[in-house]
Image (cartoon, coloured by chain):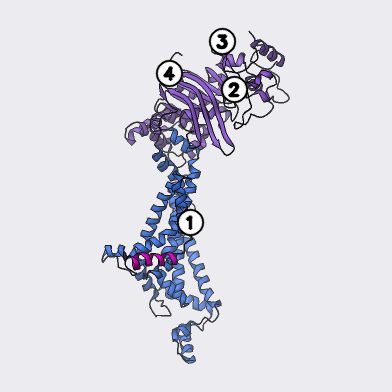
Chain colours: A blue, B purple
């Protein structure tokens, strides 16, 4: 276990370094990229731009610039170039919003996917299975921005069941919090429910034909016991891997479309703005933030894997 | 050998397939008494596994059709609703499967898997069920049962896993034990151990045992009576001595003829029955063995009944039109069939 953690921590550091280098390097090759001009403002004179460039070190060689940026990031002093806000502060203020959006959505999609996937596997080929398949295909194919817009139009604008957009903190009023987030949760979960339930269904159908399931039936277990204890338990593993990656990228800001459409001040929304402005510091912090979660959750999903299947040993 | 434990009458099992209706088992009738071991032999696809799995209700599916009855102490297993069958399976009738590697769930401890069966039928605590599992594992010869109860199947050898399956099958002292080729997947030395284990544990009390195999050596070792199946039908049944010393059906001759023997010079080629078993979707008219039978004649186009043909052996039934005297002559001419030379006595 110690060895496992050490090796994963080491690979995390490597990955963060590689991510930061690649992201930083990308901006060097973007044509007409000039952060000094962005900072100096629209009507700045050439002298002002040059002054800004010198002050921020944009005239230095790229590896020096990279080193300075990384130093600022890790001392928590880095500011974005569009609004002069402290990027680390922005992340710590916005992360609870992203957590509020992603964690309940993930619980929702896992529960729904396990339930619907199991039902389709148990009634494979039946009317329910075919209906769920159509629903899953719709869920997988509909783009998030469209689904989010349709949800807003139908349930917020037309029916007024839910507020139009916006966020209300969990700690000040949990009911308001949930009320504001129901539509975003559904928008995020829809795609994953469709995909995960189909994956679970096909796994379960493979497992159902295995000899040990026949043994379980021969023991006199009820159909429900056979399914839950033997079929489902053995069908969950591929889903665990998928979940680790999807959850990690969403925490890292991949919910940017949903956050933007529903005007939720989370990390994704901040990132979306930063990308639009070619604002390097938030983009770098965001990329490293995502990379960190990806490493963390792929390690965690390996641990869950080993718990689900005793044949698997944890190695780096 | 007087009380009939299990009575199977005119069992038919067919499956709807893309090519048409596949008749896996046709008109099979037999009985199993207390304390008796009945062996079902036949080549792959002869319907022996389907027959015993049907007794457990394991062939039930939207594509399968059943006819006939299979009464276990009066209760019909074929028409029983699923919840009744659930209470019988594992308790009254239990099964040991062919491949112990895949027959145990890879993600649960063996003790849990044994205890699970006990708890499916008896209201006892987890701790009690675990103690019973340890005791059972000791009974089937698993050393260190107390520690091994927490092990996972992948930590066991094939033979030990089959012992776990036996412990599981015997956990509730079922009155009928079905062993479906329990030694096929094991090493020869382990085979012998497992066989003697099954024999020891099943003859202790007055169980009925159905032993499915294609290994005639095992049959001679373990069975009281033998049923020979071919293309979903019983073609011959009798005691071990009757089948081995005086086989009546040419298919049985073929089976016995393909056994190599230590008391004779090894043949240059292993004898085999020429041809292939018939398709069960489009079965031939008449005797199912007729297309491969070297002794077929006109009458074989009509299906012979399974009936007694030797007045001196009322328990010996076969499905062949040939006169017993003709068959004896033919067997003597062939020279290799039956355990003693010219088994006519």
Mark earlier in primary sequence (4, 3): 4
Does the magenta portion include A163? yes
Q: Residue furthest left?
A: A172
Judged left or right of residue B252, residue A298 is left
Who's the residue at 34% across and 67% down the image?
A158
Q: Tag 2's secondary structure?
A: helix
Numbered range of the magenta stretch: A146-166
Q: Nearer the viewer, residue A241 or A193?
A: A193
Mark earlier in primary sequence (2, 3): 2
Identify the subunit bearing mark 2.
Answer: B
Nearer the observer: mark 3 or 1; the answer is 1
Q: Which mark is residue B206?
A: 4
Residue with the mark numbered 1: A137
Nearer the observer: mark 1 or 4; the answer is 1
User: How far apart are the two marked residues, 4 and 3, measured between alpha carbons?
Assistant: 25 Å
Mark earlier in primary sequence (2, 4): 4
Do discs 2 and 4 belong to a common subunit? yes
Do discs 3 and 1 belong to a common subunit? no
Q: Which mark is residue B313?
A: 3
Identify the subunit bearing mark 1.
Answer: A
Q: Which mark is residue B4?
A: none
Q: Visible in this render: residue A101?
A: no
Position of residue B80 measured from the top left corner of the image (x, y, whole percent): 41, 29
Residue with the mark numbered 2: B216
Badge 3 density bin: few <14, some 14–19, many ≥20, Cα 10 Å: few
Identify the subunit bearing mark 4.
Answer: B
Magenta span dominant secondary structure: helix
User: How far apart are the two marked residues, 2 and 4, measured between alpha carbons?
Assistant: 24 Å
Q: Are marks 1 and 4 in contact (CB under 8 Å)?
A: no
Judged left or right of residue B88, residue B16 is right
Q: Tag 3's secondary structure?
A: loop
């Amino acid at each position: 276990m110690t060895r496992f953690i050490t090796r994963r921590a080491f690979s995390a550091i490597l990955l963060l370094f590689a991510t930061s280098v690649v992201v930083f390097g990308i901006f060097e090759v973007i044509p007409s990229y000039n952060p000094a001009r962005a900072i100096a403002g629209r009507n700045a004179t050439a002298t002002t731009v040059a002054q800004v460039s010198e002050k921020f070190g944009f005239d230095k060689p790229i590896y020096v610039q990279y080193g300075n940026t990384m130093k600022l990031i890790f001392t928590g002093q880095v500011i974005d170039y569009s609004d002069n806000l402290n990027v680390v502060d922005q992340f710590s203020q916005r992360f609870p919003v992203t957590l509020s959006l992603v964690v309940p959505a993930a619980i929702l999609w896992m529960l729904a996917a396990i339930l619907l996937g199991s039902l389709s596997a148990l009634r494979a080929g039946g009317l329910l299975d075919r209906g769920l398949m159509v629903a899953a295909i719709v869920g997988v194919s509909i783009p998030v921005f469209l689904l989010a817009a349709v949800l807003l139009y139908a349930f917020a604008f037309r029916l007024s069941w839910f507020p139009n957009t916006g966020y209300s903190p969990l700690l000040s009023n949990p009911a308001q919090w949930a009320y504001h987030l129901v539509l975003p949760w559904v928008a995020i979960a829809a795609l994953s429910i469709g995909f995960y339930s189909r994956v679970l269904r096909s796994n379960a159908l493979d497992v159902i034909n295995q000899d040990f399931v026949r043994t379980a039936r021969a023991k006199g277990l009820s159909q429900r016991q056979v399914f839950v204890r033997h079929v489902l338990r053995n069908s969950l593993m591929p889903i665990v891997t998928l979940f680790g990656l999807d959850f990690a990228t969403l925490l890292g800001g991949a919910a940017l479309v949903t956050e933007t459409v529903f005007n939720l001040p989370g990390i994704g929304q901040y990132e979306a703005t930063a990308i639009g402005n070619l604002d390097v510091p938030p983009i770098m912090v965001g990329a490293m933030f995502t990379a960190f979660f990806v490493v963390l959750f792929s390690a965690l999903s390996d641990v869950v894997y080993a718990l689900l299947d005793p044949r698997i040993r944890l190695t780096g | 050998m007087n009380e009939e434990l299990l009575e199977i009458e005119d069992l038919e099992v067919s499956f709807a397939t893309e090519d048409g209706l596949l008749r896996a088992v046709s008109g099979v009738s037999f009985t199993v008494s207390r304390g008796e071991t009945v062996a079902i032999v036949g080549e792959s696809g002869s319907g022996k596994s389907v027959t015993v799995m049907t007794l457990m209700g394991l062939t039930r599916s939207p594509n399968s059709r059943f006819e006939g009855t299979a009464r276990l102490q009066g209760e019909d297993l074929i028409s029983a609703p699923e919840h009744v069958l659930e209470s019988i399976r594992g308790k009254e009738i239990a099964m040991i499967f062919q491949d112990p590697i895949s027959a145990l769930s890879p993600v649960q401890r063996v003790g849990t898997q044994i205890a699970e069966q006990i708890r499916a039928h008896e209201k006892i605590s987890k701790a009690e069920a675990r103690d019973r599992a340890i005791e059972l594992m000791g009974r089937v010869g698993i050393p260190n049962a107390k520690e091994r109860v927490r092990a996972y199947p992948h930590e066991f050898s094939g033979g030990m896993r089959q012992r776990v399956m036996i412990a599981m099958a015997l956990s509730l002292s079922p009155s009928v034990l079905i062993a479906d080729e329990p030694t096929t997947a094991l090493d020869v030395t382990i085979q012998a151990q497992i066989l003697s284990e099954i024999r020891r544990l099943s003859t202790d009390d007055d169980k009925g045992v159905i032993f499915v195999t294609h290994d005639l050596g095992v049959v001679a070792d373990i069975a009281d009576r033998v049923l020979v199946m071919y293309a979903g039908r019983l073609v011959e049944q009798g005691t071990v001595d009757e089948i081995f010393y005086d086989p009546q059906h040419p298919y049985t001759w073929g089976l016995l003829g393909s056994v190599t023997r230590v008391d004779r010079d090894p043949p240059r080629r292993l004898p085999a029955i020429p041809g292939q078993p018939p398709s069960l979707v489009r079965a031939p008219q008449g005797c199912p063995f007729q297309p491969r039978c070297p002794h077929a004649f006109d009458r074989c186009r009509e299906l012979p009944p399974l009936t007694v043909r030797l007045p001196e052996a009322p328990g010996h039934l076969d499905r062949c039109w040939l006169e017993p005297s003709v068959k004896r002559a033919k067997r003597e001419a062939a020279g290799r069939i039956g355990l003693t030379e010219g088994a006519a006595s």
